[in-house]
Amino acid sequence: MAKIKITQVKSTIKRPKDQKATITALGLGRISKSVVVEQTPQIAGMVNKVNHLVKVEEA
């Protein structure tokens, strides 16, 4: 499967609890922290939920 690199670009301060939990589940938590994960439907849904807080690139 394809790999994608997810980088957090905005803070989770004053965001709903579900968005904070999604960021944590993706392995993020600090601005400019990045993770490389496989592109699955579950990851795509999580990224779609917090797309205003993260940047996604092909890895």
Image (spheres, rainbow, N blue to C red):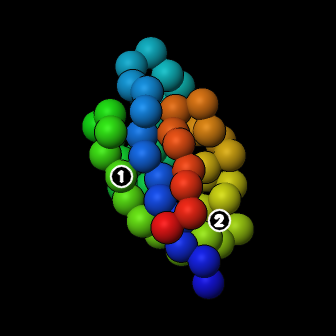
Residue that label 1 marks: 34
In the image: residue 15, left or right of residue 46: left
Crowding at dot 2, Cα within 10 Å, few <14 / some 14-19 / many 20+, comes out as few
Please give the name of the residue rendered at 42% of the width and 65% of the height, measured from the top-left corner. Answer: 36
Q: State the residue lying farthest toward the top.
A: 14
Eyeballing the image, is 25 above or below 37? above
Mark 2 or 1, nearer chain start:
1
Eyeballing the image, is 1 above or below 25? below
Which quadrant holds residue 10?
top left
Pinpoint residue 29: horizontal percent, then vertical percent: 32, 41
Pinpoint residue 46: horizontal percent, then vertical percent: 61, 52
Pinpoint residue 39: horizontal percent, then vertical percent: 61, 70
Pinpoint residue 7: horizontal percent, then vertical percent: 43, 46
Please give the name of the residue rendered at 39% of the width and 19% of the height, measured from the top-left corner. Answer: 13
Q: Report, in whole angstroms, how far the alpha carbon at label 2 lies from the one at label 1.
A: 18 Å
Residue that label 2 marks: 42
Name the amino acid, label 1: Ser
**Secondary-structure class at tag 1:** strand
